Amino acid sequence: MKTINQKGWFFVAPVVILVAFNALIPLMTVVNYSVQETFGNNLFLWQGLDWFQNLLRSDRFYGALGRQALFTSTILLIEIPLGVAIALAMPRKGIWVPVCLVLMSLPLLIPWNVVGAMWNIFTLPDIGLAGYFLNSVLGINYDMTQDPFAAWTTIIIMDVWHWTSLVVLLSYAGIISIPDPYYQAAKIDGASGWAVFWFIQLPKMKRVLTIAVLLRFMDSFNIYTEPFVLTGGGPGNATTLLSIDLVKTALGQFDLGPAAAMSLIYFAVTLLVSWIFYSYMTKDEE
Amino acid sequence: MKIRAIVPIAYILFLMLPIYWLVSMSFKTTNEILGGFSLFPQSWTFENYMTIFTDPTWYSGYFNSIIYVSLNTVISLTVALPAAYAFSRYRFMGDKHLFFWLLTNRMAPAAVFALPFFQLYSAVGLFDTHLAVALAHALFNIPLAVWILEGFMSSVPKELDETAYVDGHSFPSFFIKVFIPAIKSGIGVTAFFCFMFSWVELLLAKTLTSVAAKPIAAVMTKTSSSAGFELGLLAAAGVLTIIPGAIVIYFVRNYIAKGFALGRV
């Protein structure tokens, strides 16, 4: 039971000030840009909701949004089942547990641009390990810079490589929290392996899996650095995801209005996912 | 050996392949890399690493990164500790909304903030300083630290606080002498995650710096795009950025899920 104590505000004040400085001022800037047109020299013209209307009618935006949706749903469909399967197959005790945990966590701790650079080196058609193997040993014509399909496959495999471990670790944490008597009872009842998974393990993993889906959704929706370093959004616009398009518009072309309108749409999605996450996390605390 | 052990083994092999290739490239000479495909370095060289350790544009990148990452970790922990305590122990007006608002900042995409941050930090005269990057990364690291610490603190029974007051501790003395030692593993884990998330981020760090505080990540992107085929050098720089994570990973292995799930596992 928490005590009611308004002095709590003094404790959180520094956090509020620092985060507000970083979050509110930029957000207001973005809102400001989203309703104005600028030609530089600090000259701004009131534009109303034109940018939003333009954005919602532009093929470019729907293209980026569609690619983003395709990317996010593909990696979720691969990473979640794969992560659960690997977690189920992992040892529960013994010296192999730390070995698995350490090796599997490694990709999570690599700087994102290094992930991109590493996969670039790995997939170079002539001298990369994967590229050489595909082209010269298997005879598949693989070149990420020319073929959109190859570029897509590569960024998806890269993301699977980078983030499946997160799903594995979360699922594993759910599995090892199941007390032994559950398994013993299942054994006495003569439950099959599938029944154990469906009626014991999966319900116990529900909470961690929800966290995993939400985190993976949000982080893949925000993804920028890895595909930017690996493909730069190309070939053409084939792998220009939402964030890459946003940065191109804002910093590349300096089209502040459209970029700001896009930012606010991003913000709405962020708010929605955060709210789901939050209500799910605090549900049982009430 | 059970059949199902194949699954984790195959997965780990898949994870190690690109890393192996990076390490292997970093020990090859440029001639060997451009000369054709070779599975192992034919003539081992440390030249790539020597270049990084002797060329100021390279090694200062590492120093810059380490400076702003450490600065960020210190700032985030210092302000997050009391806040997390308040969230875990007290109820006050707006506490739930505030906790939720913090979460939205952890979830926010860096791309949205790139341009406004550039203008904001230029306006306050902090552009191209370590402090600017440290403060910018606080946007997602402070919420992260508050959420993780709150998770750890809530598992400490409230009786600890009450006993300490009965023993005659004042609040500051209780907080520093009793409470912080009680959650020191939680603080260690939080520090690790602040360090890590600041270390892996590139977009904001690159946007907020030009020369004086340029992070190693930005030095690397420049090499890969402009200088063309210095792949060995790029690989060596990449290997060096993996090392901090690889060193501490063993100590935090049981907490990695907890850290990524914001202390909620």
Image: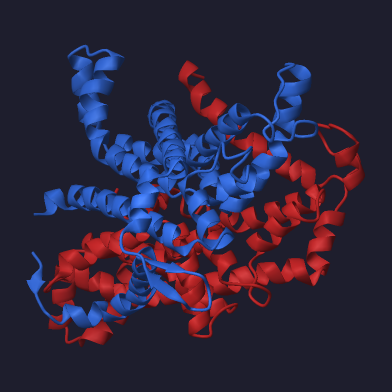
Q: Quadrant of residue B212?
A: bottom right
Is residue B128 among what the camera can see? yes
| x and y percentages locating residue B120 in the rendered image | 46, 77
Question: B148 left or right of A59?
Answer: left
Q: Nearer the viewer, residue A175 or B194?
A: B194
Q: Nearer the viewer, residue B75 or B2?
A: B75
Is residue B71 among what the camera can see? no
Is A188 placed above or below B235 here?
Answer: above
* Color scheme of the displayed model: by chain
Chain seen in blue: A
Question: A130 left or right of B8?
Answer: right
Question: A122 left or right of A246?
Answer: right
| x and y percentages locating residue A250 in the rendered image | 51, 60
| x and y percentages locating residue A282 in the rendered image | 17, 53
Q: Nearer the viewer, residue B43 or B227?
A: B227
Please identify the quadrant where the N terminus of chain A is shown: bottom left
Q: Nearer the viewer, residue A208 or A268?
A: A268
Question: B203 left or right of A171?
Answer: right
Please identify the quadrant where the C terminus of chain A is shown: bottom left
Residue at (62%, 28%) from the top-left corner? A150
Is A249 placed above or below A230 here?
Answer: below
Q: Quadrant of residue B28?
A: top right
Chain seen in red: B
Is A209 placed above or below B149 here?
Answer: above
| x and y percentages locating residue A285 in the rendered image | 12, 54
Is A213 placed above or below B107 here?
Answer: above
Residue at (14%, 69%) from the top-left corner? B159
Residue at (31%, 55%) from the top-left corner? B263
Residue at (87%, 33%) from the top-left corner? B36
Total labels: the figure holds 0
